[in-house]
Image: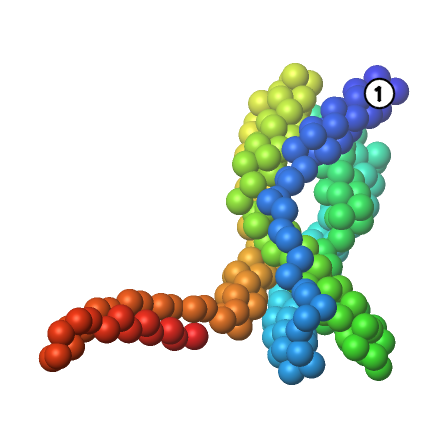
Amino acid sequence: MQIVSRVLYLAAVLACVSLATTAQAQQYGQTAASGLTEAEIDKRLSFIEQRLNDSKTHGQVWWYGWLSVNSASLAGLTAAAATVSNHDDRIKNATNATKAAIGLGRMLLDPLEARKGADPIRELPSATREQRLKKLRAAEEQLRQNAKRAESRWSWKRHLGNAVINGIAGGFVAWQGETGHAYEVGVGGFIGGLAFILTQPWAPEDDWQDYQRLTTSNQQSLDWGLSVATLPEGGAMLNMKLEW
């Protein structure tokens, strides 16, 4: 019972650290405007849907792969912790099972939307102009959220959280009297957490920047200039040149 209570206390501490270090990426503004022509709406929708689908396979591999790893780890390590007779092994397995449970819970609470590609967007109605504009706004929002998730791979909060969680876990194991297992839990867990963060789909970050360039390239620009020419019979002529 003493081990169980200590592990539950560890789980509460690690869960608090995980929530406290959740990344908050920069905010993006919407670009869809009601003044767009039908051709511009089609062009933007086509671009976004293509980019969303480009990251779909990567998103599915990452999502289902890590979901399986965390689920299997939670089940296997929990069973091992409950059945093993060695005290040190029981502590190590229980600690790693706790981290797997937190990782699984975080995935389910904050699912990776990039795994769906453009499917949610294509399901939206598009019979009228208003519906098509709403569809475009929804598509922009999805592309934006995917970009924010990709950007979070470099968030100092996420990497600090990974270090703190595994440092606490390793320290907990060492406190229970097993230094060798403490390095395995702490360092091994940190490397695993690093892989979890960095292997998320990264293309959406560039996709959003490309979309921003696409929308701004359609805006017209005005260049102008003035010149003065002397006339043969005297006087001068002012010329103005406009380019757009």
Q: How many marks?
A: 1
Image x and y of residue 167, in percent: 60, 27
When the figure is inspected, residue 163 is found, relative to residue 199, above or below; the finding is above
Picture residue at 69% right of the left edge, 18% below the top: 176
Q: State the residue at coordinates (72%, 56%).
A: 112
Residue labelled with disc 1 = 5
Q: Nearer the viewer, residue 238 or 80?
A: 238
Q: Quadrant of the C terminus?
A: bottom left
Residue positioned 73% across, 33% down in the render:
19
36 up-or-down from 100: above or below: below
Q: Quadrant of residue 132?
A: bottom right
Q: Residue 236: image x %, image y %? A: 19, 71
Which color mode does the image show? rainbow
Quadrant for the N terminus in the image: top right
Q: Position of residue 175 (x, y in %)?
A: 65, 17
Residue 119 rendering spot, x and y as whole percentages: 77, 72
**In the image shown, does 164 or 141 lie closer to the viewer?**
141
Camera sees residue 155: yes
* Mark 1: few/some/many CA within 10 Å (<14, 14-19, 20+): few
Which kind of residue does numbered mark 1 sit on?
A: Ser
Q: Is residue 219 above or below residue 4?
A: below
Q: Secondary structure at mark 1?
A: helix
Q: Residue at x 56, y 41 (%)?
A: 155
Up-down relation of residue 146 to residue 189 (above or below): below
Left or right of residue 243, residue 166 in this image = right
| Residue 236 appears left or right of 197 | left
Q: Nearer the viewer, residue 28 or 180?
A: 28
